[in-house]
Image (cartoon, rainbow, N blue to C red):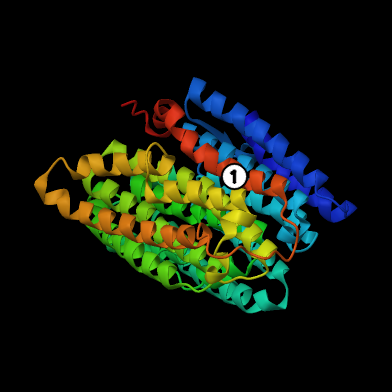
């Protein structure tokens, strides 16, 4: 657990140091992210060598103890979180405008620490605390864009508080019925009672609201599009994944299998509708970052679809597909948002039509959008393709499952449409763009790096499957 604790406390202490020292640059935050990444790698190695481990905070015995749990999946998520924070931090250090204000560095460290604590937590109330810390940091980061972001940040805050209230009501029902909140202990006692059904319904709706899962997604496009570029990348790649993790934990570990079997098709249907609705909204969006934000709504539909089919069919491959979608989407979205920020700032316009001929002025940024967009579409051998392939395998094993393949196909076509909308404009040679500021090649290459990483997931697909579910083929 030492590596996991280092991964948690390094950004926490780094954030406190930033607020106390008030440095002009993000050196403390970058150092904290690097230390956290080192600790996360150690934690992943420990989880693979020794298996899952538990740590009771404060040494309290059960059932009073609040416990941290380290598994291979948690270790991988810790590495993923620290690596993306480091990449985004390096970009923000190169492009201070992308951070909004200097407070970005301290808030991003606290956001990092909240996510690390969320991945490690296995207590329903502790998960609530980490969710609140995560949401408050995210709202504060959105507001760094200035007055134009205050309304989206306020909407985000109010809806997030509503989601928290629903989740907390579900936690209270569980505690009243069973007297414990530790998830493994509670799972051993849980029965498919009316109380548990209501508690799971309340918690699920609250988490779907916080994760902006369809149809509770209306706060996300204004907040993500209005935030500073580096903040948008963190929100889309990482923040919305925290509630998804808790939703997965509730329905795969806490809920009895029969309840998961009943609710699975509803989650899956919501995922398909998210793919279609979000893709259509992205295709019609007039502004570039709004297009990318609606793309997040659509792509999260794959995670919801994977969770729903996992609950319905209990296929280990679907669990691997779910988390591969999370990893691939996070890497691709960091690249796309950073590339969109480069295009928007350099060309001096937020609108999609301003991209005409952008490949002549910002070739690396446009190439980044193409590479990351290819993973979102699911082109081989990207991480998006691997996840989609694992999702489709059990779908094609029985004729009655084939309609779900139609939903995946429609989602793929919608993704291809809005990605090619940007690409077609960017590579149109009819007009060369005039730039408002000089292009920064190094910043563009930093934006490209996560997109290259998502395409390299094919090289480590076998160990990834082992880390996620133990499935090696």
Of 232 and 109, nearer the camera is 232
Farthest residue to the top: give it: 49
Q: Residue at x 77, y 57 (%)?
A: 96
Q: Position of residue 210 (x, y in %)?
A: 49, 64
Q: Quadrant of residue 227?
A: bottom right
Vertical side of 38 occupied by 314: above or below: below
- Indicate the quadrant containing the N terminus: top left, top right, bottom left or bottom right: top right
- Examine the rendering and report whether any part of residue 179 can be seen: no
Q: Position of residue 433 (x, y in %)?
A: 63, 64
- Indicate the quadrant containing the C terminus: top left, top right, bottom left or bottom right: top left
Vertical side of 383 occupied by 129: above or below: below
Q: Residue at x 46, y 34 (%)?
A: 457
Residue bearing mark 1: 448
Relative placement, left or right, of 407 versus 149 is left
Relative placement, left or right, of 233 versus 20 is left
| Label 1 environment density (alpha carbons within 10 Å; few <14, some 14–19, many ≥20) | many
Q: Position of residue 378 (x, y in %)?
A: 37, 46
Q: Position of residue 368 (x, y in %)?
A: 55, 48
Q: Quadrant of residue 31?
A: top right
Q: Residue at x 39, y 36 (%)?
A: 381
- Examine the rendering and report whether any part of residue 319 can be seen: yes
Relative placement, left or right, of 376 versus 43 is left
């Amino acid at each position: 657990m030492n590596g996991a604790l280092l991964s948690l406390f390094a950004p926490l202490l780094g954030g406190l140091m930033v607020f106390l020292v008030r440095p002009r640059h993000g050196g403390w935050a970058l150092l904290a992210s690097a230390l956290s990444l080192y600790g996360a790698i150690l934690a992943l190695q420990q989880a693979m060598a020794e298996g899952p481990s538990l740590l009771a905070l404060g040494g309290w015995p059960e059932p009073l103890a609040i416990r941290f749990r380290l598994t291979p999946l948690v270790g991988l998520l810790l590495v993923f979180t620290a690596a993306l924070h480091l990449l985004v931090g390096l970009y923000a250090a190169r492009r201070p405008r992308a951070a909004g204000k200097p407070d970005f560095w301290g808030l991003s460290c606290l956001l990092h620490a909240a996510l690390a604590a969320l991945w490690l937590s296995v207590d329903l109330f502790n998960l609530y605390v980490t969710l609140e810390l995560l949401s408050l940091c995210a709202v504060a980061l959105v507001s760094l864009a200035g007055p134009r972001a205050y309304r989206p940040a306020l909407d985000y805050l109010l809806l997030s508080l509503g989601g928290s209230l629903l989740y907390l009501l579900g936690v209270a029902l569980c505690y009243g019925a069973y007297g414990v909140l530790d998830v493994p202990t509670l799972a051993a006692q849980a029965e498919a009672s009316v109380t548990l059904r209501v508690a799971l319904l309340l918690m699920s709706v609250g988490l779907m609201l916080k994760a902006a899962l369809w149809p509770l997604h209306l706060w996300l496009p204004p907040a993500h599009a209005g935030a500073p570029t580096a903040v948008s990348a963190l929100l889309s790649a990482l923040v919305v994944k925290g509630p998804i993790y808790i939703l997965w934990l509730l329905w795969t570990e806490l809920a009895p299998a029969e309840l998961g079997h009943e609710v699975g098709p509803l989650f899956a249907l919501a995922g398909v509708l998210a793919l279609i609705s979000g893709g259509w909204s992205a295709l019609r969006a007039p502004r570039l970052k709004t297009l990318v934000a609606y793309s997040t709504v659509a792509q999260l539909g794959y995670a919801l679809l994977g969770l729903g089919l996992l609950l319905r069919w209990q296929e280990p491959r679907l669990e691997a597909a779910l988390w591969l979608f999370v990893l691939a989407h996070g890497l691709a979205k960091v690249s796309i948002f950073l590339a969109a920020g480069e295009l928007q700032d350099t060309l001096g316009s937020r609108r999609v039509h301003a991209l005409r001929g952008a490949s002549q002025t910002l070739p690396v940024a446009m190439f980044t959008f193409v590479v990351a967009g290819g993973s979102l579409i699911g082109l081989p051998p990207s991480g998006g393709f691997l996840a989609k392939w694992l999702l489709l395998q059990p779908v094609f094993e029985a004729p009655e499952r084939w309609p779900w393949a139609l939903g995946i196909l429609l989602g793929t076509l919608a993704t291809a449409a809005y990605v090619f909308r940007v690409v077609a404009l960017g590579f149109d040679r009819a007009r060369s763009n005039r730039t408002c500021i000089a292009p920064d090649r190094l910043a563009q290459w930093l934006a490209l790096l996560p997109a290259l990483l998502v395409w390299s997931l094919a090289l480590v697909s076998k160990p990834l499957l082992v880390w996620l579910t133990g499935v090696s083929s």
